[in-house]
Image (tube, rainbow, N blue to C red):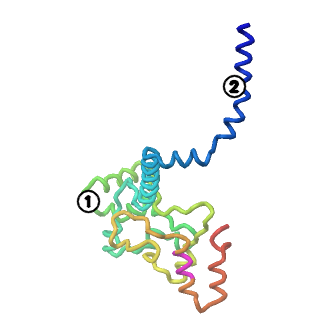
Amino acid sequence: MLDKLKKSHLIDRLKALPEKFRSFNLFESLTRLIKRPVFQISAAVFILLFLSAGSYGIWLTQQPPRQPIQFSHKLHLGFGVQCLYCHPGAWKGPSAGLPTETKCWGCHQQIPIKNADQQKLADSVYKNEPIQWVPVFILPDFVYFNHRPHIAAGVNCETCHGELSRMIVAEPRKNLNMGWCLHCHRTRFANDEVKLTRLTDCGTCHR
């Protein structure tokens, strides 16, 4: 008898389920939830944290990385050292390259060692261990950039890399993006339709 009552009660509950589902209004429930102060505060905090994390990430990309040697562009350019002396690859192809420790030592072996950075250079040469420089200007894999045509066209290094004569270590150039490059191409070749078409074509820089 008890088992029959349990089964009957269970059947009644199962029959009532569809009616409960029909009376359930998802939109009204969500509206009530959104109107709750706790939900609104939680959503505001989440959005604030999300925007803060995004802003911090963008800020980090604009900061100069910590280099193994605090190479001073300002000091070397002040001595009259030309960009292409240390970065001759810009004449020849896509990558400007970095000077070898031997090239640096060609000048620095004539200078008394006065600080830790100079000692690091000397140790690198004597131990035949390359200095592990940290890249500053990093392009995505889908972007093709070649220094050579820009140098041949008379574009100065500071046009793209900023005023290095005022920098210690090289710093990322803010807003150096596709829009910036396109604006330069359109400005320089506004009166040359052939070059303008080629230099604003997607396939020129994206291969």
Mark 1 or mark 2, earlier in chain: 2
Residue at screen point 47% across, 58% down: 135
- Verify whether residue 12 appears in magenta: no
Q: Residue 59 at x, y = what percent? A: 41, 59
Apparent side of residue 15 relative to residue 141 in the rendered image (left or right)? right
Predominant SS of the magenta segment: helix
Query: Marks 1 and 2, how far apart in space?
Result: 92 Å
From the viewer's perspective, is residue 198 above or below residue 94? below
From the viewer's perspective, is residue 73 above or below residue 133? below
- CB of mark 1 within 8 Å of CB of mark 2? no
Task: Name, please, the residue furthest toward the top.
Answer: 1
Of the residues tagged 1 and 2, which is closer to the observer?
A: 2
Q: Residue 93 at x, y = what percent? A: 58, 71
Magenta region? 180-185
Residue 3 is labelled as none
Residue 112 is labelled as 1
Residue identified by numbered label 2: 13
- Image quadrant of residue 169? bottom left
* Residue nearest the viewer, comparing 85 with 180: 180
Q: Residue 188 at x, y = what percent? A: 54, 86
Label 2: few (<14), some (14–19) or many (≥20) C-alpha neighbours in 10 Å: few
* Residue type highlighted by circle 1: Pro
Q: Residue 96 at x, y = what percent? A: 51, 68
* Residue type highlighted by circle 2: Arg
Quadrant assignment for the C terminus: bottom right
Label 1: few (<14), some (14–19) or many (≥20) C-alpha neighbours in 10 Å: few
